[in-house]
Protein backbone atom coordinates (compact mmCIF):
# COMPACT_ATOMS: atom_id res chain seq x y z
CA UNK A 1 0.00 0.00 0.00
CA UNK A 2 1.27 3.42 -0.89
CA UNK A 3 1.09 6.45 1.32
CA UNK A 4 -1.90 8.72 0.76
CA UNK A 5 -1.17 11.59 -1.62
CA UNK A 6 -1.67 15.15 -0.58
CA UNK A 7 -3.40 17.81 -2.67
CA UNK A 8 -0.18 19.33 -4.04
CA UNK A 9 1.01 15.94 -5.33
CA UNK A 10 -2.29 15.28 -7.06
CA UNK A 11 -2.20 18.73 -8.69
CA UNK A 12 1.37 18.22 -9.83
CA UNK A 13 0.56 14.89 -11.46
CA UNK A 14 -2.76 15.85 -13.06
CA UNK A 15 -2.31 19.53 -13.87
CA UNK A 16 -2.47 19.29 -17.67
CA UNK A 17 -5.37 16.87 -17.57
CA UNK A 18 -7.38 19.21 -15.37
CA UNK A 19 -6.58 22.23 -17.55
CA UNK A 20 -7.53 20.29 -20.71
CA UNK A 21 -10.86 19.33 -19.17
CA UNK A 22 -11.47 22.94 -18.12
CA UNK A 23 -10.83 24.12 -21.70
CA UNK A 24 -13.44 21.81 -23.27
CA UNK A 25 -16.19 24.49 -23.15
CA UNK A 26 -13.91 26.81 -25.13
CA UNK A 27 -13.50 24.13 -27.79
CA UNK A 28 -17.28 23.77 -27.94
CA UNK A 29 -17.75 27.52 -28.34
CA UNK A 30 -15.16 27.66 -31.13
CA UNK A 31 -16.98 24.82 -32.90
CA UNK A 32 -20.29 26.64 -32.42
CA UNK A 33 -19.13 29.74 -34.33
CA UNK A 34 -18.93 28.10 -37.79
CA UNK A 35 -22.12 26.15 -37.08
CA UNK A 36 -23.99 29.38 -36.31
CA UNK A 37 -22.60 31.00 -39.44
CA UNK A 38 -23.64 27.99 -41.52
CA UNK A 39 -27.13 27.38 -40.12
CA UNK A 40 -28.39 30.83 -39.13
CA UNK A 41 -26.21 33.64 -40.49
CA UNK A 42 -28.75 36.28 -39.44
CA UNK A 43 -28.21 35.51 -35.76
CA UNK A 44 -24.43 35.65 -36.11
CA UNK A 45 -24.30 39.41 -35.58
CA UNK A 46 -25.59 38.94 -32.04
CA UNK A 47 -24.27 35.49 -31.14
CA UNK A 48 -20.64 35.70 -32.29
CA UNK A 49 -19.63 38.71 -30.12
CA UNK A 50 -21.27 37.10 -27.09
CA UNK A 51 -19.42 33.85 -27.72
CA UNK A 52 -16.12 35.70 -28.15
CA UNK A 53 -16.63 37.55 -24.86
CA UNK A 54 -17.39 34.24 -23.13
CA UNK A 55 -14.30 32.61 -24.65
CA UNK A 56 -12.05 35.44 -23.45
CA UNK A 57 -13.63 35.47 -20.00
CA UNK A 58 -13.41 31.70 -19.58
CA UNK A 59 -9.82 31.56 -20.88
CA UNK A 60 -8.76 34.24 -18.40
CA UNK A 61 -10.35 32.23 -15.60
CA UNK A 62 -8.48 29.07 -16.67
CA UNK A 63 -5.21 31.05 -16.80
CA UNK A 64 -5.92 32.30 -13.26
CA UNK A 65 -6.59 28.73 -12.10
CA UNK A 66 -3.36 27.60 -13.76
CA UNK A 67 -1.39 30.28 -11.87
CA UNK A 68 -3.03 29.24 -8.60
CA UNK A 69 -2.10 25.63 -9.33
CA UNK A 70 1.51 26.73 -9.89
CA UNK A 71 1.50 28.53 -6.56
CA UNK A 72 0.19 25.43 -4.81
CA UNK A 73 2.85 23.36 -6.53
CA UNK A 74 5.63 25.78 -5.53
CA UNK A 75 4.67 25.91 -1.86
Image: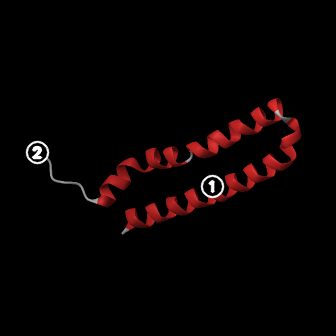
Q: Which mark is residue 59?
A: 1
Tell me: 10 left or right of 37.
left
Tell me: 27 left or right of 5.
right
The residue lying at 52 percent from left, 49 percent from top is 22
Q: Residues within 10 Å of mark 1 (few under 14, many from 20)?
A: some
- In percent of width and height, residue 67 lies at 51, 63
Q: Residue 53 is drawn in which quadrant?
A: bottom right
The residue lying at 66 percent from left, 59 percent from top is 57
Rendered position, 17 above or below 74: above
Rendered position, 19 above or below 35: below
Q: Which mark is residue 17?
A: none
- In percent of width and height, residue 29 lies at 67, 43
**Residue position for label 2:** 1
Residue at the limit of the structure toward the left, as seen here: 1
* Model colouring: secondary structure
Q: Mark 2 vs mark 1: which is more N-terminal?
A: 2
Q: Residues within 10 Å of mark 2 (few under 14, many from 20)?
A: few
Rendered position, 30 above or below 63: above
- In percent of width and height, residue 71 lies at 44, 67
Q: Residue 56 is drawn in which quadrant?
A: bottom right
Tally of marks: 2
Q: In front: mark 2 or mark 1?
A: 1
Mark 2 lies on a secondary structure that is loop
Looking at the image, do the residues carrying marks 2 and 1 touch, with CB atoms under 8 Å apart?
no
The residue lying at 80 percent from left, 30 percent from top is 39
Tell me: 39 left or right of 5.
right
Residue at the limit of the structure toward the bottom, as seen here: 75
- In percent of width and height, residue 15 lies at 43, 51
Judging depth in this view, the residue of 22 and 45 nearest the camera is 45
Cα–Cα span, label 2 and label 1: 39 Å
Q: Quadrant of the C terminus?
A: bottom left
Amino acid sequence: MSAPSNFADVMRKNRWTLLAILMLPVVGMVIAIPLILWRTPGVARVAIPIIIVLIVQYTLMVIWISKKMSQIKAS
